[in-house]
Image (tube, rainbow, N blue to C red):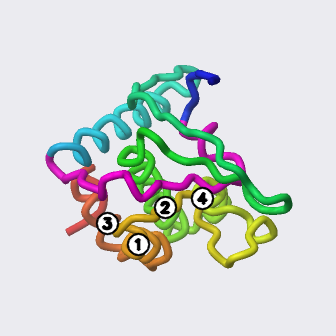
Amino acid sequence: METAVRTPLEIFNLPQRLVIPLFQRAYVWTLDDQWEPLWGEIRRVAELRLKNPSVAPTHFMGAVVIQAMDGVVGTLQPRSIIDGQQRLTTLQLFIDATAAVFEELGIDHLAAQLEGLTNNPAHYVTDGNTLKLQHTNRDAGAFAEVMSADPPVTGVLDSEARRAGVGGS
């Protein structure tokens, strides 16, 4: 068994299938208990980086355990998520939402870079499903729908702008 500290970029950067097995519980994170604290940490780290780009602030998200699965030659390497599916799912949702905001703002090159963290390039995919994270339990349909939906980015941008004191009205 190999153990290593990896960033989300290192986890999501490779073309692969991160499979959440059937035995894993359904997605249970809530706004107050997990989403808002994580969003606060993401904002803190981003603001520190923006203020001083040479600083590398960190946030420990806990252990993630991924096990290689048998694959078929010529297909994406599947890996089973043994521990960390709640965190990895949430990060995928955050990355996808951030890419949508960048796209709405016309920052297409950054949106495309983030899309590469949530979706495999089409030439690696044989079944039409490009998502890197694959739910196999009852969350599969909802996760796929959210990840492929066109979000109401304008409402999010307006809300964040008001919170940051930007924009008129």
Q: Secondary structure at mark 1?
A: helix
Q: Which residue is mark 4?
A: 132
Three-letter amino acid code of the residue under disc 1: Val
Q: Secondary structure at mark 2?
A: helix
Q: Nearer the viewer, residue 38 or 162?
A: 38
| Residue found 30% across the figure and 62% down from its top | 167
* Picture quadrant where residue 3 is located: top right
The reply to whether the magenta stretch includes residue 109 is no
Residue 62 spot, x, y in % from top left: 39, 28
The amino acid pointed to by label 3 is: Val
Label 1 or label 4, whichever comes before in sequence order: 4
Q: How many marks?
A: 4
Three-letter code, disc 2: Asp
Residue with the mark numbered 2: 96
For the point 59% across and 39% down, the residue is 67
Find out whether the residues at labels 3 and 1 contact each other: C-beta distance under 8 Å: no
User: Which tag is nearer the camera, tag 2 or tag 3?
Assistant: 2
Q: Are marks 2 and 1 in contact (CB under 8 Å)?
A: yes
Relative placement, left or right, of 110 versus 38 is right
Give how far apart the Cα atoms at labels 2 and 3 are: 13 Å
Disc number placed over residue 155 in the picture, else none = none
N-term-proximal mark, 3 vs 4: 4
Of mark 2 and mark 3, the one earlier in the sequence is 2
Q: Which residue is mark 1?
A: 146
Where is residue 116 drawn, in percent x and y? 66, 57
Q: Label 4 to label 2, Cα distance in Å?
A: 12 Å
Rounded to the nearest whole Å, what is the CA distance between mark 1 and mark 4? 14 Å
First reached walking from the N terminus: tag 4 or tag 2: 2
Dot 2 and dot 3 residues touching (CB under 8 Å): no
Q: Which residue is mark 3?
A: 156
Please tell me how crowded label 2 is: few (under 14), some (14-19), or many (20+) other residues with Cα within 10 Å.
Answer: many
